[in-house]
Structures are given as C-alpha cells and as structure tokens.
Image (cartoon, rainbow, N blue to C red):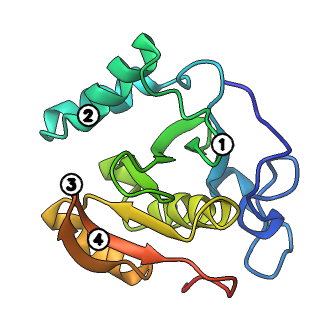
C-alpha cells in the first residue's frame, strides 16, 4: 500500500505525513494508538486477509465482494472522486471504507465496503474514515448515498445521512460547503 500525500483529507483529521494529530492540531503523546488513514492505491493493504476473515465470520460478505472486485479490476476506487481508505492502529489494519461513483443516481457518489474490526469499534475509526471520505466527496459531488445495514443506521444518521430507501440505497447525505457534523 502506498500513501498518497495529495489526498483530500484534512491535516487535522489524518495528521501530517501520516502522523495523527488531536482535534486541536497538536501531536498526541501516544500516537501509536491513534488511527492513521492511508489511501489504498496499488494493492489491498497488509492485514486485509485477517480483516476479511473476521468480516466473513460475522456474516459481512461485502468484504469478500471488495476483494473480488479489487482483484478483477471491476472496482479499484480510482475514478474521479473515488477513494479506498485503510485505517491502521499500531500497524494493525483496523478498518476499511470506500467511496465510488454512484451507479444509479447521476452526479452522486456512494459510500461502500465499510468495515471496522470488532476490537476497534466504537473508537472513532468508522467516523474518521467516513468523515475523510465525505470531505473528499465535496470536491466531486453534492450527494452521497449509502446502503446501510440495519445495525449501522444510527451511525450513518449521526453523520448527517437521512433515510431515503430507493434506487439501491437506504440513506443520502446532501453535501454543502459548510463543515460536516461531528
């Protein structure tokens, strides 16, 4: 996996050169426990097999789909506005999430293939992944969709997504130029 410094995440959210900062932009004492977001560009990240096996054991088959689509080249998160991010904590792949062009709604993007390993849930990693991708989406679209699993609807709604079950998605987020909800 290669880190792309030109990605559109804020320095506050992702740190400078991969060094995470707290919400005030100050380096923290225990940076090794802070999630580092890296863009997946050439190959799936180290530790993906472990993440994939854990997701499979929980019945989350979309991680299998991510692997199959990546290997076949069907979805590589490399078109304008797209990205696949990996969250690492102390060199462990803790989560992954992506943003692609929405196949049904013209001019929109779609959040997809989000998974945070059980040991890292409720630590802010999913929110950090989603927020970084929503910030990136502002440069390419005004609407982002997601097909939220029933257990994740509260999470997506806390980020500003509104229920809208149609066209293959469950929620939409209308982007504006203001700051995202935190």
Q: Reading the chain from its start, which is encountered first: label 1 or label 4?
A: 1
Circle 2 residues within 10 Å: few <14, some 14–19, many ≥20:
some
Q: Nearer the viewer, mark 2 or mark 1?
A: 1
* Position in image of residue 92 (x %, y %): 53, 36
- Report the number of discs: 4
Name the residue at 84% across, 75% down.
25
Q: Reading the chain from its start, which is encountered first: label 2 or label 1?
A: 2
Q: Reading the chain from its start, which is encountered first: label 3 or label 1?
A: 1
Name the residue at 30% across, 50% down.
118
* Position in image of residue 128 (x %, y %): 56, 64
Pointer 4 residue: 171
Q: Is residue 49 above or below residue 129?
A: above
Calculate the distance from the C-alpha at mark 2 to the C-alpha at mark 3: 26 Å
Q: Reading the chain from its start, which is encountered first: label 4 or label 2?
A: 2
Q: Nearer the viewer, residue 83 or 31?
A: 83
Question: Is there a contact, CB below 8 Å, between mark 4 and mark 2?
Answer: no
Question: Is there a contact, CB below 8 Å, between mark 4 and mark 3?
Answer: no
Secondary structure category for the residue under label 4 = strand
Pointer 3 residue: 168
> Would you identify the image quadrant in which residue 39 lies?
top right
Circle 1 residues within 10 Å: few <14, some 14–19, many ≥20:
few
> Would you identify the image quadrant in which residue 3 lies?
top right
* Position in image of residue 151 (x %, y %): 17, 65
Calculate the distance from the C-alpha at mark 2 to the C-alpha at mark 1: 31 Å
Pointer 2 residue: 54
Calculate the distance from the C-alpha at mark 1 to the C-alpha at mark 4: 22 Å
> Would you identify the image quadrant in which residue 62 lies?
top left
Calculate the distance from the C-alpha at mark 4 to the C-alpha at mark 2: 26 Å
Circle 4 residues within 10 Å: few <14, some 14–19, many ≥20:
many
Q: Nearer the viewer, mark 4 or mark 3?
A: 3
Secondary structure category for the residue under label 1 = loop
């Amino acid at each position: 996996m290669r880190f792309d410094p030109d990605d559109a995440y804020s320095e506050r959210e992702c740190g400078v050169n991969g060094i995470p900062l707290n919400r005030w932009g100050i380096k923290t004492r225990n940076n090794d426990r802070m999630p580092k977001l890296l863009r997946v560009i050439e190959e799936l990240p180290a530790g993906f097999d472990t993440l994939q096996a854990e997701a499979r054991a929980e019945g989350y088959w979309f991680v299998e789909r991510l692997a199959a689509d990546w290997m076949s080249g069907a979805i590589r998160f490399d078109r304008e506005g797209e990205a696949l991010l990996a969250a690492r904590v102390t060199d462990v792949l803790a989560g992954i999430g992506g943003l692609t062009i929405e196949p049904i709604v013209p001019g929109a993007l779609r959040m997809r293939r989000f998974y945070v390993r059980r040991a890292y849930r409720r630590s802010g990693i999913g929110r950090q992944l989603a927020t970084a991708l929503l910030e990136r989406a502002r440069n390419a679209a005004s609407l982002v969709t997601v097909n939220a699993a029933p257990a994740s609807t509260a999470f997506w709604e806390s980020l500003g997504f509104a229920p809208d079950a149609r066209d293959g998605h469950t929620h939409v987020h209308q982007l504006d130029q203001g700051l995202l909800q935190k």
